[in-house]
Amino acid sequence: MSGITWRSVPFAALTTTELYDVLQLRTEVFVMEQAGIYQDMDGADHAAVHLLGTADGGLVAYARCFPPGVKFAEASIGRVITRQILRGSGQGHELMRQAIACVVEQWGAQPIRIGAQARLEKFYLQHGFAKAGDPYIEDGIPHVEMLRPLSFQEQT
């Protein structure tokens, strides 16, 4: 697989093919792999900037980035996905670096809050996020809120 090309676009700028690929990947991972029966299309896609990572003509990584006030009071990142073939390659870390950069580019340096799957807490700790709430269940999966403070962003 060749290198990943990154592109961040608002919902209205997604092509129909890109939107199809995004929804297909999200369904593949969050519904099929994780056996989660839930409504992935939550009405928030229109408010997001969509980060697309493509390689060899296909979508291999994806995240949604939100301004403050949509998902949380702070800016946020969600629906963080890498295609199974990339897992363990370090590309998930590159995806998070790109998503954080997308938030900063779109809305300036600021705190970022996420609702992380609890099993990935250590992964997000590596990107400056710290646990910021009690564990909770979302769509049948344990989650925890995590916050990346502005002070951490100013260090990077």
Image: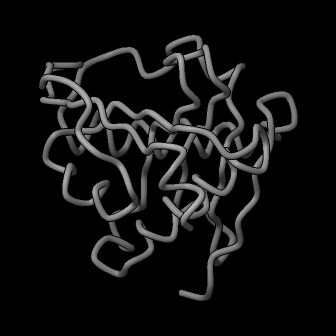
* Residue under the image location 60 percent in, 58 percent down: 154
Q: Viewer-proximal residue, 71 or 133? A: 133
50 with respect to 147 (left or right): right
Residue 74 in the image, given as x and y percentages of width and height: 54, 25
Name the quarter where the C terminus is drawn.
bottom right
The way the protein has been coloured in the rendering is one colour
Quarter of the figure with residue 37: top left
Q: Viewer-proximal residue, 132 or 85? A: 132
Residue 61 in the image, given as x and y percentages of width and height: 52, 59
Residue 39 in the image, given as x and y percentages of width and height: 39, 15
- Residue 47's place in the image compared with 19, above or below, is above
96 with respect to 35 (left or right): right
Residue extending furthest bottom? 2
Quarter of the figure with residue 26: top left
34 with respect to 45 (left or right): left
* Residue under the image location 14 percent in, 19 percent down: 137
* Residue under the image location 13 percent in, 47 percent down: 119
Residue extending furthest right? 13
- Residue 48's place in the image compared with 139, above or below, is below
Quarter of the figure with residue 15: top right
- Residue 120's place in the image compared with 131, above or below, is below
Q: Viewer-proximal residue, 49 or 86? A: 49
* Residue under the image location 66 percent in, 54 percent down: 52
Residue 19 in the image, given as x and y percentages of width and height: 68, 37
Total number of numbered labels?
0
